[in-house]
Amino acid sequence: MATDKQVKLRIENLSLSFGGVRALIDVSLDVRDNEILAIIGPNGAGKTCILNCISGFYKPQRGEIHYNGQTITRMRPDKVAALGLARTFQNIELYTGLTTQDNLMAARHVLMKQNFLSGALYFGWAHKEEIEHRKTVEDIIDFLEIEPIRKKVVGVLPYGMRKRVELGRALALEPKVLLLDEPMAGMNLEEKEDIARFIIDVFEGQGATYPNTPVLRDGITCIILVEHDMGVVMDIADRIIVLDFGRKIAEGTPAEIKSNPEVIKAYLGQAV
Amino acid sequence: MGLPCGTHNYTYDQDMAIMRTKTHWALLVALLVLLFTFPLYSGGYLLSVANLIGITVIAAIGLNILLGYCGQLSIGHAGFIAVGAFTSAVLTNVLGLPFLVGLIAAGFMAGFIGLLFGIPSLKVKGFYLAIATIAAQFIIIWVINHLKITGGFVGIAVPYASIGGLVFDSEASMFYLIMVIAVICTFFAKNLARTRVGRAFVAIRDNDLAAEVMGINLFYYKLLAFFIGCFFAGIAGSLMAHWIGFMNAEQFSLMESILYIGMIIIGGLGTALGPILGVIFIRLMQQGMMFVAPTIEAAFPALPAGFATGLAPMLFGLIIILFLILEPRGIAHRWMLFKSAYRLWPFSY
Ligand SMILES: Nc1ncnc2c1ncn2[C@@H]1O[C@H](COP(=O)(O)OP(=O)(O)OP(=O)(O)O)[C@@H](O)[C@H]1O
Ligand SMILES: [Mg+2]
């Protein structure tokens, strides 16, 4: 099984601080292929900071991040995205003036080839490409069950729907690694279950249901999930990393984490 | 978006089409026929107003791409129009090059100068960018006034536009030249807006953080928006120069730049129809004021001198404020509401 669980993303001795605030202190972790890795920890532990460093949005003072043998530390965010890393945000960051469908189409940006000239002329080339990508986007809309809001401007959608559109936008980039920052925060139980099911379905792949959309057909085999809801994390994560005050204090399977005294002290003890 | 009752999309092709029904096509053809036969039944004055509107629409489409779609505020648009006007004037008058060379060069020159002044947009937004672009306005006009080749403070004469043997020396012939280019510009802008680059612009406008993390190169696309927006301004400037026949930098004031922003706000930011409707509204209002002003002054001699002429900018300010309060999405949005009501007919919901 060793080949099965190759390291996809390696974070080495990452340190990040904002003035006097030390957000991350010497954090190292591996994200492997064929696993859902959860990162948990109390508020302000540095979970979002890790994702922001991977995205290239924050520049860590020390440490390196490697993806598929390439160093991506301090790389520009759009280049990281083009390598196949997509994410959602803790506080929804959609393109509020665009429709659901166009939010997803906008995420196809790195996969499309038109430039402003072919786009402005439209007929022929650009038209064909638009249709092609529209098909993938429709598959994702279908998968996430958001057909009714396809043509709605996302700014007016309810919170739960916007969260779902944001997941769709990340999928539309057809990433190799998916980073999810609290995809279930602020949701009720039913909505949480929906999202959990989508995450598992994306991870496992849908095979013949979406034969022409690789991201749904084959799934995304490497997912990082930042989440507060312990129940969900214990259920769907293969491995868990626990952060506290910017340090990694534990790592292991859900069962190991549950019985780790340090974790209980730092996190579970105060949360439960 | 609504479709006329009873119309359904069966393919993505149909869903993406701008023209969905035979009625749409009929309306478009009717509109174009109406537009291009306009000189046949209108006199010189109306034609000159139409020409002014056509040129203004071209420039406004450019600003709409920059501000309406990409969200980059520029208060120097008249400056970039001036770059186009004087580029074309110098190339045709001083160097004796053909009009078409002047026209294209005007677009590129304005585009590149726009790109230069767009560089601050990579670091600053909103208010700060506005100040940086006001600098563009003043620097450009200062340079034109102090260059020998542009005629300095005096200005420069510009020959008639001509293509091959065809000389555009009347309002009517200029009308056709301007409107053909305006229609082409509208077509380009509409297509740009609904494809990859347009979505990237709106993504930057709505959430630049997410846009970058989702793979959009902010550096490239912000500068591209400045280039395209100012390219349109340059084309408009060239047409303006060959239409009026004499260019002086004073014609491109800061007030005119602000007026452009007002026009696309009133028309509807980030919509294809917005610049057209906004330009028609403001330019007609200006013309109306020119008629009304003398009448007011005659009727109320007690008013201070120049009161009526000062009325136009005041009214303009008032209208913008009213639009921002009552219909921030502009006339284009009102039109959409009207259309969707019409589409649902005969049902009321
Ligand atoms: N841009 C920033 N400027 C200053 N401090 C920051 C910034 N971003 C994060 N921090 C600080 O870094 C620390 C870690 O923040 P981070 O957002 O990663 O926490 P988190 O684990 O995601 O918490 P939560 O569960 O509340 O989302 C916090 O103390 C936070 O205040
Ligand atoms: Mg967080």
Image: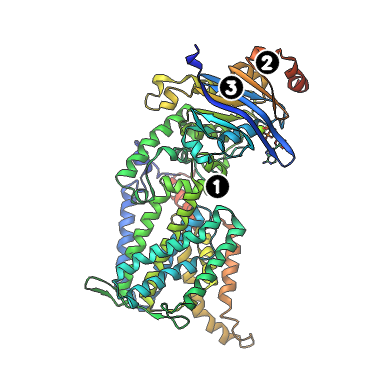
Q: How many angstroms separate mark 3 from mark 1 (CA)?
A: 31 Å
The residue marked by circle 3 belongs to what chain?
A: A
When asked about the image quadrant of residue B297, the answer is: bottom right
Q: Is residue B303 left or right of residue B133?
A: right
- Callout 2: helix, strand or loop? helix
Q: Residues within 10 Å of mark 3 (few under 14, many from 20)?
A: many
Residue shown at 61%/24% (left/top)? A29
Q: Which residue is mark 3?
A: A37
Residue shown at 53%/41% (left/top)? A76
As drawn, B335 above or below B206? below
The residue marked by circle 2 belongs to what chain?
A: A
Ligand 1 lies under 8 Å from the Cβ of mark 3: no
Q: Which residue is mark 1?
A: B206
Which quadrant of the picture is home to ligand 2?
top right
- Callout 3: helix, strand or loop? strand
Q: Which residue is mark 2?
A: A257
